Amino acid sequence: MASHSDDYDDVDTDTAVVAAESPRLCAMISIDGVVTTKALPDVGDVTIGRDASCDIVIPHASVSRQHAKLRMSPLEIADAGSRNGTRVRGADLEPHVPVPLAVGEAVQIGRCAVLIHSSSIILDDPLDDGVPDHSPESFARMFEMECARSARSRSPFSFVRVEVREGRAPEVGDVLRSALRTSDAISTDGPNGFQLLLLDTSADQTSAAVARMTQLLAQTGLSVKVGIARYPQDGVTAAQLSAHAWERLSRPPHAPPTEMDHVRTLIAQIAHGDVSVLITGETGVGKELCAEMIHRLSARAGKPFVKLNCASVVESLIESELFGHERGAFTGAITARPGLFEAGNGGTVFLDEIGELPLSVQSKLLRVLEEREVRRVGATVGKTLDVRFVCATNRVLADEVAAGRFRRDLYYRINGVTLSIPPLRERRSEIAGLAKAFARRSRPASQLVMGADVIDALEQHPWPGNIRELRNTIERAVLLSSGGSVRVAHLALENEASRAELVGGTRPTPRVTLTDFEVPRMTPDPQTLANAVAELERKRILDALNEYGGNQTRAARALGISRNTLLSRLDAYGLPRPRKS
């Protein structure tokens, strides 16, 4: 006869079998094509949002910190007052009003999707099944969106690049994933590297998190090199942050601060005041990005950041652009329109190329700076204005004042603090990081190799066009590499002046469709490498467009570059954008 203990053993065993076979509800989360599954509890409420405190964390720019709440019994969901809304069965949910949900139904959370389904697989730790790997392309999109989201929400985050000794990447990856929160993101970066996004994380929190990761790695006998870039202290764009992380990773431990380190320190100091700032530097050094960094670090970061290139607006319209106009103020003024200054009220106004401002407008700008009042064209009364002015120029304004082309009193008013940005040739330690960042942006879906000889060639070039020239050079090199490694020949750095003249003088023939468009031929000197590369690049672009009937997306994919890169190369060569045949 079986003992009582045997009976209990039988009962326990049967219960375990039933539990293993009974289905359990799970949430399948789709974020930009990356799908993860999280087990749900049997009872209680499950919070969904971007904040790390949520039960289900969805790290996407379209998802609010506290976006929705899922109730398990009875199964229903309610929007938590999110910014981009929650949709079930194609209908938007009213905030805080629960709606019944059936197993197998999907919920749209911002631009992400959550599918509630049943599974017979039991997870020991519901709601905590690790951080999924993003593809490089998905990670790049998330990086760009996080920059845009943080610009709106003022939430800091950090980008971390990790370099591993050859052959140890899988082990390092396991440790990194175990140390990350579910709100963070990780992706491979070549065979021996990783890139991380630490969302909603301050500089101190980032330092603590990286220290914890390196300590965990050291305990298992693994050593890595780490480069950190913080938003917005180190940059406000993905390329800027990525380049800074590369530079920090390759910098020796006790190396002295770079020129741009001093610039960033000064930006952090002047950001907290309201004094006007004048940013000087050559064309293409990144003056606009520095202006935005000042704004994002200031108390005005939650207010507008508006900008105007004074050289891009014709003189007859620039006054209306800056000050706005009333209805009927001039021919064509059908409705009243606020100007740039009013649009930026409470925030920061950035005037690029202020040295190009006509003298007639300079006097009116001076009045705005002194009286803090703006009057629209055609108005009889002014409006009080609260903005901070940041101006930039590639001219020497002191010389312009001496020549009578710029008002002396205006010069002193905008020059509260001068921020001088060094040219790229004086920032050679940044070139490799910038080049890799631009290359990754041009071809995010695949790994791209740049040898030491390529980096050496880039660092030796004088870069008269600064960062803008470097970006164009890398985009061209990625296109010519045809999906393979970038070589020195692809850079075409020899005789850049003659190449620019050649490309600038090209005149495309107008066309109706791609097939009847006659491509202008260049006759480059066969002894000039840059000319030969330029001709090859044009030919590859046109061959791809012809092959795919003018479809720019398919042509770009065949060339191994992004569509935006293809369009920029068409513009560089003066080629019209084709229509599909």
Image (cartoon, grey):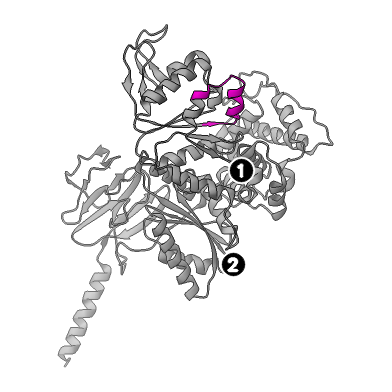
Q: Is residue 190 left or right of residue 277?
A: right
Between residues 77 and 489, which one lies in front from this camera angle? 489
Q: Residue at x 76, y 31 (%)?
A: 498
Which of the marked residues, 2 or 1, is nearer the chain's N terminus? Answer: 2
Q: Is residue 569 left or right of residue 302?
A: right
Residue 319 percent location from the top left of the image: 45, 16
Question: What kind of element bears circle 1?
Answer: loop
| Quarter of image, res 511 | top right
Question: What kind of element bears circle 2?
Answer: loop
Q: Residues within 10 Å of mark 2 (few under 14, many from 20)?
A: some
Residue 139 percent location from the top left of the image: 47, 50
Name which residue type carries label 1: Gly
Between residues 473 and 18, which one lies in front from this camera angle? 473
Q: Tell me the distance, in whole angstroms, between the alpha carbons under discs 2 and 1.
A: 29 Å
Name which residue type carries label 2: Arg
Residue 525 percent location from the top left of the image: 83, 32
The answer to whether one can see residue 229 in this image is yes
**Magenta range:** 392-409
User: Magenta segment: does it hold 395?
Assistant: yes
Q: Which residue is mark 1?
A: 560
- The total of numbered circles placed on residues is 2
Q: Where does the N terminus fall, quadrant-wise? A: bottom left
Q: Is residue 6 above or below residue 458?
A: below
Q: Residue at x 33, y 45 (%)?
A: 63
Q: Is residue 552 above or below residue 400?
A: below
Q: Which residue is mark 2?
A: 165
Q: Residue at x 64, y 33 (%)?
A: 547
User: Magenta segment: does it hold 345?
Assistant: no
Q: Where does the C terminus fall, quadrant-wise? A: top right
- Looking at this view, name the residue that lies furthest to the right: 527
